[in-house]
Amino acid sequence: MDFSLDRIKDFPSAFSFLIDTMIQSGKYVYQEEGMVSKPFWLNQSEKFSSFYERIKRKDEALDKLKLEVVRPIFQNFEVEFNGKIINNESKVQDDFVKVSTHDSSDLTLNTPQGLFFQTGKLVLPFSETYSQVVNHNKNYKIKNNPYPLLLLIGLYTTVFNAIKEQETSVTNQCFKDNIQILLDGLEGCDGIPKRKSNQPNNPMNMLQNLMQNFDFSQLSDMMGKVTGDEKASKEFSEVFGKMTESIKDGKNPLESMGDIIKDVSSRMEDEDPDVPLVKEEPQVVKEEPQVVKEEPQVVKETFEPQLDPLPETTTM
């Protein structure tokens, strides 16, 4: 089942989503039950779909549809729409849209049971379609089928987008809360992909989108060639493989990288117990003080001969 938040963002898209879901879920029951002929409630949905395709781009027709077709639905079930969609036991409060499906294949009346949209002779039988799907899943013990929740999402978003401009903030908040609860419940259903973040400019989202298309195996091969170590290449391959897997699961790539590095570091310590956990201080070689040998001083002796004094001269 194709689903995205864009399909319920405004009244035209939400009503279109509701009609498409009713037809798809109706065909699902019709085929699974092996019905001989197409039931009345499915035929009516297909006829209503053809009518809506002709007017969904005409503002005047859409305004008339909001006022005359959808708003009366809210007025008839105002108490239910303003209540919680689930009770304290986490059970969906959908009794107001359920009807009996006993012998419904023989039903030929023009007016369906329960909640339905009507314009002229055309009818969109929500309650009958919803009840058929719910009962089929219950009878065959089918769990995690998304159609009941998708139908309720289509109903609530269609009514909300039709009446939100005229209703109080309290009523609008009740619709928002119930729609969010239904969307959260849809996450665990079969065939429904995880919702993408509605913040395309978030740097982390941009990083995830870029890294999703990155082939980490090429990087591990390159590291193996550079190091020439097969063991290193294998370890790189394992690390990058985990990295790729975490990114595909929508996890934060930076957090995943940190966890992977911690895991690898822990294993390295286990594999090599001889590696000390505390860094050894480098040994400092003390230099011995150099002893300077004093050279013996050579005393130079000067020979000075003893001279006899000159005789005194006698004056004549």
Image: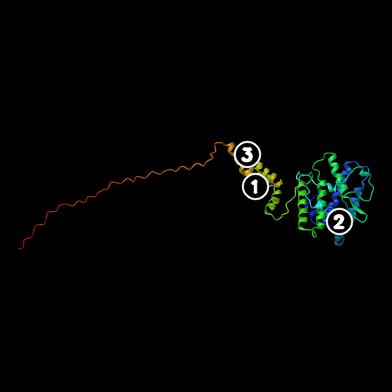
Residue at mark 1 to residue at mark 3: CA–CA distance: 25 Å
Distance from label 2 to label 1 (Cα)? 51 Å
Do the residues bearing badges 1 and 3 touch, measured as CB atoms within 8 Å? Answer: no
Measure how far apart labels 3 and 2 are at the Cα level. 71 Å
Looking at the image, residue 205 lies above or below residue 232? below
Residue 133 shows up from this direction: yes
Q: Is residue 228 visible?
A: no
Occupied quadrant, residue 225 = top right
Please identify the residue farthest to the bottom as the structure is shown: 316
Q: Residues within 10 Å of mark 3 (few under 14, many from 20)?
A: few
* Among numbered discs 1 and 3, the one appearing first in the sequence: 3
Tell me what residue is drawn at x 81 percent, y 52 percent.
79
Residue at the location (84% across, 55% down)?
75
What's under tag 2, amino acid-wise? Pro
Say the numbered circle drawn on residue 255: 1
Of helix, strand and loop, which one carries label 1?
helix
255 sits left or right of 8 in the view: left
Mark 2 lies on residue = 72
Name the residue nearer the viewer: 24 or 110: 110
Percent of width and height locating residue 228: 62, 41
Q: Relative to 230, is 4 above or below?
A: below
The residue identified by callout 3 is 231
What residue is at 58 percent from the left and 38 percent from the top? 269
Mark 2: few/some/many CA within 10 Å (<14, 14-19, 20+): some
